[in-house]
Amino acid sequence: MSKLKSIFTFKCPQCHKGEFFESRNPYNLKKIGNVRESCSECGLKYEKEVGFFYGAMYVSYALGVALFVACWVATEILYPNYSTGFLIGLISVAIVGLGPILYHLSKIIWINLFVSSKEIGSTEGAEK
C-alpha cells in the first residue's frame, strides 16, 4: 500500500513525505519530468546512477499499451460501429492529453521498483 501512496502522490519512495518532482503539476511544461536531486525529508538520492531513469521508458511503454487497450475496449463497448480513423484519433488525443501524466507515472513507478520504503516512525537513514 505504501508503494501506491508514493506513486499516486508523487512523493519520495522511501519516506513518502518529500517531493519527488520539482513541480507536482505534470502539465508544467517548463519543469516536466524534472526530478529533484534528493529527498528533502530523508536525504534519499533519487538518481542512483547516470541514466537511471532511462529504464522508465519500459514502464512508459507498458502504460501506453494499457491506455491503448483501455481506449480500444471502451470504444468496442460504447461505440461498436466505430471506424478505424475514429479509434486512431481517440488514441492520439488520449496519448497527447495524458502524455505528461504517463511520463510522471513512469518515473515514479520505476524508482519504486528499486527503493524500499521505510516503516513509519523509523529514523534509520534519516541522518544521512
Image (spheres, helix red, strand yellow):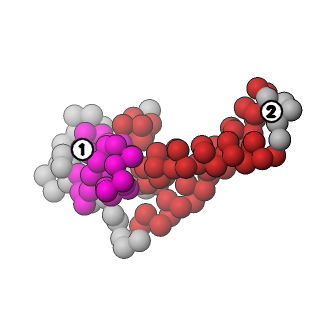
User: How far apart are the two marked residues, 1 and 2, measured between alpha carbons?
Assistant: 42 Å
Mark nearest the camera among 1 and 2 is: 2
Q: In screen coordinates, is 56 left or right of 86?
A: left
- Which corner quadrant of the image does residue 48 belong to? bottom left
- Quadrant including the N terminus: top left
Report the residue at 33% width, 64% height from top. 47
Residue 96 magenta-highlighted:
no
Give residue 70's mark.
none
Residue 12 appearing in the image: no
Q: Residue at x 76, y 26 (%)?
A: 78
Pinpoint residue 124: horizontal percent, then vertical percent.
21, 47
Q: Nearer the viewer, residue 101 or 41?
A: 101
Image quadrant in which you'd find residue 128: bottom left
Q: Look at the numbered disc 1 and give the secondary structure of its residue.
A: loop
Residue 29, compared with residue 82, is above or below; it is below
Magenta stretch, main secondary structure, is loop
Query: In the rendered image of this protein, does residue 20 appear above or below residue 47?
Result: above
Query: In the image, residue 117 lies at what x, y percent?
Result: 35, 44
Of residue 85 and residue 46, the one placed in the foreground of this image is: 85
Closest to the observer: 46 or 65?
65
Query: Where is mark 1, residue-wise?
Result: 18
Q: Secondary structure at mark 2?
A: helix
| Residue annotated with mark 2 | 76
Amino acid at dot 2: Glu
Q: Is residue 90 at least partly visible in the picture?
A: yes
Residue type beneath disc 1: Gly
